[in-house]
């Protein structure tokens, strides 16, 4: 069963804060009045109140940090190879594309918009809750075409330079204008998979994985609506492939 951690965090913060506030405003006065002269008994807080008072500040700080500043994620698949590997722990800038309400995702302050080449985290359009990470290829108003493993944006061929063959993949350096990054193309696989042409509507974005022949992305399920955007991935802070392996910090650094 998938746990909606942001929702759980919001609920726990709200409930603990409400209990603490209720004690300050109402319950404490009644407790003091009932205790009378028993001063030490009056000072003792009920277990639930004490727990809420202890946890509320911590939960509130975590909620603010995760919702409006920076949130950590772990890469679960190889769709963004070679840029991101399975087991990479990344940091996502939550305010780069505007401040949004936790859980609802409603933008409350417009700071900026995704740019071509950004590595973006968003909620999967098919279910609205699973976090996905892909690279922004098409912006609102763009026309994106993909034919025989070649990308075109607004009828302009996106240039890519051969880097090396690492069977079963070929590594190429793709130039998206402001951003250059490596992509994987699977050798020997037909170039017809994921072919098509798309006109990008306003407020939506076309995304693709850097591992082009092994990525479930906009070529198959369409564009990403603005309200589904989570933030911009900007750094790798740790790599931990599995519980049976040791964490590594060799891949620490920025994300192209």
Image (cartoon, rainbow, N blue to C red):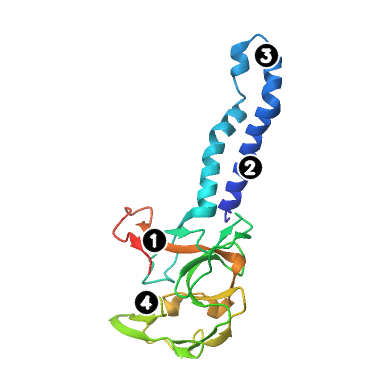
Q: Which mark is residue 14?
A: 2
Q: Quadrant of the C terminus?
A: bottom left
Residues 1 and 99: in front is 99
Q: CA distance from mark 2 to mark 4?
A: 44 Å
Residue with the mark numbered 4? 180
Q: Which mark is residue 35?
A: 3
Q: Are marks 2 and 3 in contact (CB under 8 Å)?
A: no
Element assignment for label 4:
strand
Q: CA distance from mark 1 to mark 3?
A: 55 Å
User: Sequence-wise, which precedes: disc 4 or disc 1?
Assistant: 4
Element assignment for label 3:
helix
User: Sequence-wise, which precedes: disc 2 or disc 3?
Assistant: 2
Residue 23 occupies quadrant:
top right
Q: Is residue 75 above or below residue 47?
A: below
Q: Please state the horizontal and vertical placement of residue 159, each as a whole percent of the image.
A: 39, 86
Element assignment for label 1:
strand
């Amino acid at each position: 069963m998938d746990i909606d951690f942001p929702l759980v965090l919001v609920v726990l913060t709200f409930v603990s804060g409400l209990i603490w506030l209720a004690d300050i405003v109402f319950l404490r006065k009644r407790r003091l009045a009932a205790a009378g002269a028993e001063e030490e008994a009056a000072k003792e807080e009920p277990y639930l109140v004490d727990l809420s008072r202890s946890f509320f500040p911590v939960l509130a700080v975590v909620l603010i940090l995760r919702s409006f500043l920076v949130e950590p994620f772990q890469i679960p698949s190889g769709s963004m190879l070679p840029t991101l590997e399975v087991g990479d722990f990344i940091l996502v800038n939550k305010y780069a594309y505007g401040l949004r309400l936790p859980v609802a995702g409603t933008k409350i302050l417009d700071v900026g918009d995704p740019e071509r080449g950004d590595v973006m985290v968003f909620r999967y359009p098919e279910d609205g809750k699973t976090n996905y990470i892909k690279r922004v290829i098409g912006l609102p108003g763009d026309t994106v075409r993909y034919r025989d493993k070649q990308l075109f944006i607004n009828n302009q061929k996106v240039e890519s330079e051969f880097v090396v063959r690492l069977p079963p993949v070929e590594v190429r350096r793709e130039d998206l204008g402001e951003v250059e990054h490596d992509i994987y193309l699977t050798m020997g696989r037909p170039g017809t998979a994921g072919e098509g042409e798309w006109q990008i509507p306003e407020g939506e974005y076309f995304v693709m994985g850097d591992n082009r022949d092994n990525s479930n992305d906009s070529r198959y399920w369409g564009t990403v609506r603005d309200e589904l955007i989570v933030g911009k991935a900007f750094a790798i802070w740790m790599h931990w492939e599995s519980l049976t392996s040791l964490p590594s910090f060799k891949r620490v650094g920025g994300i192209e």
